Structures are given as C-alpha cells and as structure tokens.
Image: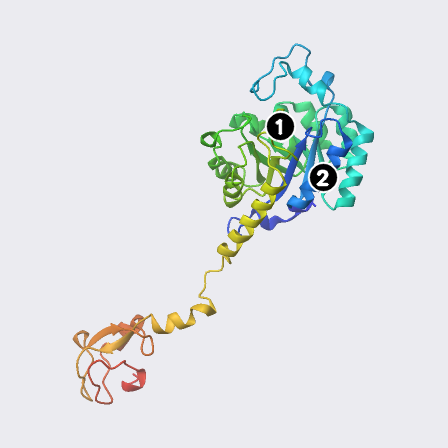
Amino acid sequence: MLRDLFANEGLKAENNPIVRPFVIAEAGVNHEGDMETAFRLIAEAKEGGADAIKFQTYKANTIVVKDSPSYWDLTKEPTDSQYKLFQKYDKFWKKEFETLARRCDEEGIEFMSTPFDEESAFFINDLVSTHKISSSDITNRPFIELISDFGKPILLSTGASYLSEIQDAISWVDGKGTPLCLMHCVLNYPTPNDRANLARISGLKSAFPNHLIGYSDHTLPEEMQTCMIAGMLGATIIEKHFTHDKTLPGNDHYHAMDKEDLKRFRSLWKKTGILLGSSDVTSHQEEDKSRKYARRSLVANCSIAMGEIVTEKMLTWKRPALGISPSEYGNLLGKEALVDIAEDTTLQWEMFQSN
C-alpha cells in the first residue's frame, strides 16, 4: 500500500537505485456521477497498471462561493463558474465512496479520494491508508491540521505555491508528527511542456531532504515522457488525471491519460529499469573477456638481456592484459632480468628478480 513507502527509509537515500514510482490514476470526478462509469475507471486503471485510483470528494456549497468565476479554458469546459462546475459533479457522497472503496478492494487496486471539507475528510479517513491534500488547500492551516490529526501519511500538492508557503504547510504537518510527501505540481490545465518545470523535483528534494517527493502531472500524456522524466528525477509517487475516454468534453478528460497510456508508461519504465541495472560500482562478469583482451600489459620495447636492469626505455604497453599490468610500471623499473627477453614479449613477473 501507499503508506508503506513512508516506512521505507531507503527511498530517502540519495545513493539508492531509482525505483519505479507508485502510480496514482487520478479519476477525480471523471465518473460524472455515474457509478458504472466509476467502476469502469477502476477496472481500466487496474488493467493499465496503476497502483491506486483516486477520486475527489466535495459538495459545491462547501468548496466555493456561488459567484466564484471560472479560471479554465472555456473552449474545453464551457461551464462559466466554479460553483456550477462543482455542482455538476458532487453527487457522490459517503455511501457511494464506500461502494467505490469495496470495488477497489475487489479489483486489487488501492482506493484514494481527496477530501475538500471536514465532513468528507472524516468519512474518507475510514476508507484510505493515505490522504491527499490539493494545492488549493496548501494555505488552509485548519484543514491541513485536521487531516494531519488522523495520523495517516499525507500527499500535499504544491502547485502555484511559493517556497515560504510550502515551508509553512510542512511545519503544520510536521507539528503533528505526520508523514508527508510533497507533490510538485503546476496548476495549469493542461500544463504546457515548457512550464512543467520538472527540475523543481530536484529542488524540492534538496530543500526538504526529510520528506518524500512526488509529482502531480497536468501535461498532455503524449508518450508519457513527462512522467518518465519525473520518475528518473526521483519522484517517488506520480499522480496523473485518468479517463476512460479522452475525447469526452469536460475539464479533466482531454488532458488525462487512459489505460493505454498507463500501459505505455509501465512498459517504458520496465525497459528503463533494465537499462539502469545496478548502482554497484564494480566490473560485471560479462566484462571479463574485455578486461583480459582489451586492456594492456607491459611489453618489452626492445631485447632485454639476462642480468640487465629494467629502465623506462625498455618498456611499452600493449594488448592483451595477459602479463604485468601497466599499473605496476613503477614497481618493475629497476628490476634485474633473470632470462633473455625478446622484443615485443609480454612481460611476466617470473622473468625478473623478486626483490
């Protein structure tokens, strides 16, 4: 389960090999209030290889005032106010989310949901191992402290935040002793590639070495390159909007990934893992032949008579490495030859006096 990542201190070690990120399919409200669609999203997220599927839990009247303006691309989502948009998708509540949690258990995928008010926070707490707090609540101290009091790990998105705001939020969570993962995030839907700022993952890791760092992605899925790079930069958890049909109208369908994108990511990551291999700094058995035949030995640069003392002019180095290593060059100088040695002979220690 996701909470297990927080118990694995090895994930925080800078010299650890890169591990596959925990992938969250962010279904949000793409079920649009239909339980069968929600079940389909769960099944397809599992089929695609997601580790968890996450929904959103809210009521329009507790999240936004009625005259709150829209801030999204109206050509993609024509609803002209936040209240109207949230009202369209706030039909699921406690009973429905309990049903979704049971279905996730049956499918073998972890259930998550982001709460947006106190009531939903309490009943969602009974259904999840880990909480998610959206970027929109990063300055909401009472809500962050409420969630922290549950004692379960928290994923906190950091979209549209200044460093000082992130520091404040961390202090509220740390004050409760609650495990925390900071999610790099850009609050643009979709986020243009030149605004993804994936280097901020490294910045967050440097600034907050005692916390896990993840990535909440809003770029177009394309070839899932953004998520791949985020993982390579050390994002422990990756979250991305998820849909069963990217052609559907609405704010969270057109920039979401689907099950085929998920499969592509898992396949690419598997190939990447093969390429990464081990972080151990050593020569591998498959390289033994190259060590022997591509490296060099000390070789007689001229004929050396028995009894002669070895000088620099008498030595050169050539392949293969079947004799004295050039690393012993200084130790061979000054040695007396015990036998006659022909030019271009690969030198062996038994040809020389031992002291």
Residue 135 % position (x, y): 60, 27
Report if the CB atoms under discs 2 and 1 are less than 8 Å apart.
no
Picture quarter with the C terminus? bottom left
Question: Does residue 259 appear to the left or right of 315 in the view shown?
Answer: right
Mark 1: which amino acid?
Asp
Q: Is residue 20 visible?
A: no
Q: How many callouts does the rendering have?
A: 2
Q: Nearer the viewer, residue 37 or 8?
A: 37
Instruction: Judge by depth and name the residue closer to the eye, 68 or 107.
Output: 107
Residue under the point 44% across and 31% down: 194
Q: Is residue 186 left or right of residue 323?
A: right
Q: Is residue 237 left or right of residue 281?
A: right
Give the image location of residue 322, x and y in percent.
34, 78
* Above/below status of 351 relative to 26: below
Category of crowding for the residue at label 2, using alpha-carbon neighbours closer than 10 angstroms: few (below 14), some (14–19), many (at least 20): many
Q: Using the rendered view, name the quadrant where residue 181 is placed.
A: top right
Q: Is residue 70 visible?
A: yes
Hey, which residue is sitting farthest right in the picture?
95
Q: Nearer the viewer, residue 86 or 125?
A: 86
Where is residue 354 shown, x and y percent of the image? 30, 84
Residue assigned mark 2: 42
Give the residue type that dot 2 points to. Answer: Ile
Residue for badge 1: 252
Instruction: Give the quarter of the image for residue 218.
Output: top right
In this orientation, which residue lies closer to the viewer: 209 or 244? Answer: 244
